[in-house]
Amino acid sequence: MNRREALLGLQHEYRVRAEAIRRDLGRSHSPDFAEQAQQRQNDEVLEALLAEAELGLALVNQALARVADGSYGLCLKCGEPISEARLNAIPAAEYCLSCAGAMAGQSSQAARLK
Ligand SMILES: [Zn+2]
């Protein structure tokens, strides 16, 4: 499958999701106090989902920029090609498996040292 098309599909999905969440967040609140409290809790969940969708969209946009300049599929850290399987699973992947693993390892090591 064409990577650019896969990324454009993802970009569309994230945009639609973010718009739907923004619409939900923009709705008018109930005058009922108990319902308002419930709605505020829902809003917090929605805001977290919106942040996730926006982050995903930003990563997809960066990946599309790399497709345009020809550097797509290369690890941003070591410059080695990212495996096909990884790109199939995560089309906007920025790092190869070993660099992503090393970074995850470093942060858990740092956590252990504290
Ligand atoms: Zn790497």
Image: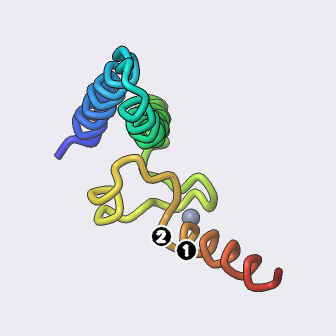
Residue at 49% x, 42% y: name it.
71
User: Looking at the rendering, which quadrant does residue 78 occupy?
Assistant: bottom right
Looking at the picture, the colour scheme in use is: rainbow
Residue 106 in picture, x, y percent from top left? 70, 75
Residue at 46% x, 60% y: name it.
81
Residue at 64% x, 69% y: name it.
103
Q: Is mark 2 within 8 Å of ligand 1?
A: yes
User: Looking at the rendering, which quadrant does residue 34 occupy?
Assistant: top left
Residue density around tag 2, few if under 14, some if 14–19, many if 20 or more, within 10 Å: some
Residue at mark 1: 101
Residue 58 in picture, x, y percent from top left? 48, 34
Q: Quadrant of ligand 1?
A: bottom right
Residue 56 in picture, x, y percent from top left? 43, 41
- Provide the secondary structure element on which disc 1 rests: helix
Residue placed farthest to the front in the image?
33
Identify residue type, mark 1: Gly
